Amino acid sequence: MHPSYNIFIACTANICRSPIGEGLAAQIAATHNLIFHVRSGGTMGLIGKSPAPNSIKTMKKIGIDISSQRSNAITEHDINWSDYILVMSPKHAKILRARYPFAEDKILILANFGGMVQIEDPIGKWIFAFHACRKNISKCLHGFCKQLVTRSS
């Protein structure tokens, strides 16, 4: 039996970083014998927008289609559903901890699991920035999974 977790991934608009994270998380979790149920959203409250074209392209390059994802605002329901809320920057953590103080312990900065302070927003940049973003998110998700496996054993 593999441990199962509800993971919520958050960034600002939910069109670049968190859709990439949502696309990668379950697949990466499986490599660590974990099961992730994944949702994503943005602190900005943008609803119904497609992922950025370069987010879609960088994920297609590794065989993952995120084109059907749509942006969401983060709700209290999402916070309650989540075992962990992985955010891209200290700013996102600050915003969510202020909005949902009861969930402070669930809100984690994903970048910290890869030895970084934050995962840079590639919005408006060349495709190479999106590839770098995907690689950083992947590295940090692997680090997060390793921590979960260590905690549960």
Image: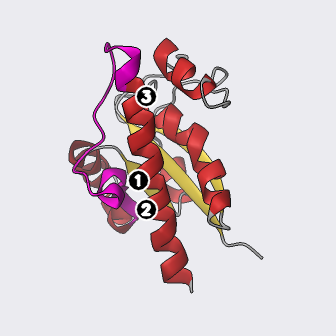
> Mark 3 or 1 closer to N-term?
3
Q: Which residue is mark 2?
A: 143
- Residue at the spot 30% in from the left edge and 29% down from the top edge: 121
At mark 3, the secondary structure is helix
Q: Which residue is mark 1?
A: 140
Q: Could you tell me residue 30's position as x and y percent?
A: 68, 59
> Mark 2 or 3 closer to N-term?
3
Other-residue count near label 2 (Cα within 10 Å), few / some / many at <14 / 14–19 / ≥20: some
> Image quarter for residue 45?
top left
- Residue at the spot 47% in from the left edge and 46% down from the top edge: 138
- Residue at the spot 45% in from the left edge and 62% down from the top edge: 144
Q: Could you tell me residue 24's position as x and y percent?
A: 58, 43
Q: Which residues are magenta?
A: 106-129
Foreground disc of the pair 3, 1: 3
Which amino acid is tagged 3?
His
In the picture, measured across the screen, residue 107 lies left or right of residue 21, that is left
In the picture, measured across the screen, residue 150 lies left or right of residue 4, that is left
**Residue 102 is inside the magenta segment:** no
